[in-house]
């Protein structure tokens, strides 16, 4: 699994959160947590064209402020979940 493939996986899932339709039941692809219920907020990752939850958005902002690199896509929940569905 490399970063490029992880991006393809995540962007294929990104449709679930975009296109004017918003599925609250779909977990945050970055952490697997709940997505925000306020449709108007429509938070996206600072680094990728993918919607993420409030907490992840906060964490990304914090990392940027601290000059840290973004969490590799290969570490995102949706990617690890796809690779290890039993765990
Ligand atoms: Zn999240």
Image: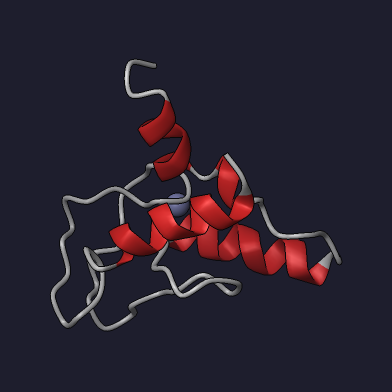
Q: Residue at x 71, y 64 (%)?
A: 62
Q: Is residue 41 above or below residue 51?
A: below
In the figure, is residue 25 to the left or right of 82? left
Quadrant in which the N terminus appears = top right
Tell me if residue 49 comes above or below residue 83 in the rendering.
below
> Residue extending furthest top?
86
Q: Position of residue 82 (x, y in %)?
A: 37, 35
Q: How many marks?
A: 0
Q: Look at 38% across and 42% down and name the residue there.
A: 32
Give percent across and percent down for residue 4: 58, 57
Indicate the colouring scheme: secondary structure
Instruction: Please tell me in which quadrant of the rendered image residue 63 appears.
Output: bottom right
Q: Residue at x 65, y 50 (%)?
A: 72
- Where is residue 68 shown, x and y percent of the image? 82, 59
Q: Quadrant of the C terminus?
A: top left
Which quadrant of the figure has residue 43? bottom left
Compared to residue 87, the image places residue 71 above or below, namely: below
Please give left or right for residue 44 compared with residue 15 in the image: right
């Amino acid at each position: 699994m490399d970063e490029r493939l992880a991006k393809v996986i995540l962007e294929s899932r990104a449709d679930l959160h975009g296109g004017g339709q918003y599925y609250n039941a779909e977990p945050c692809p970055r952490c697997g947590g709940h997505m925000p219920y306020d449709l108007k907020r429509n938070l996206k990752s600072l680094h990728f064209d993918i919607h993420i939850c409030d907490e992840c958005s906060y964490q990304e902002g914090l990392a940027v402020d601290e000059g840290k690199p973004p969490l590799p896509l290969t570490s995102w929940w949706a990617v690890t979940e796809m690779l290890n569905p039993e765990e």
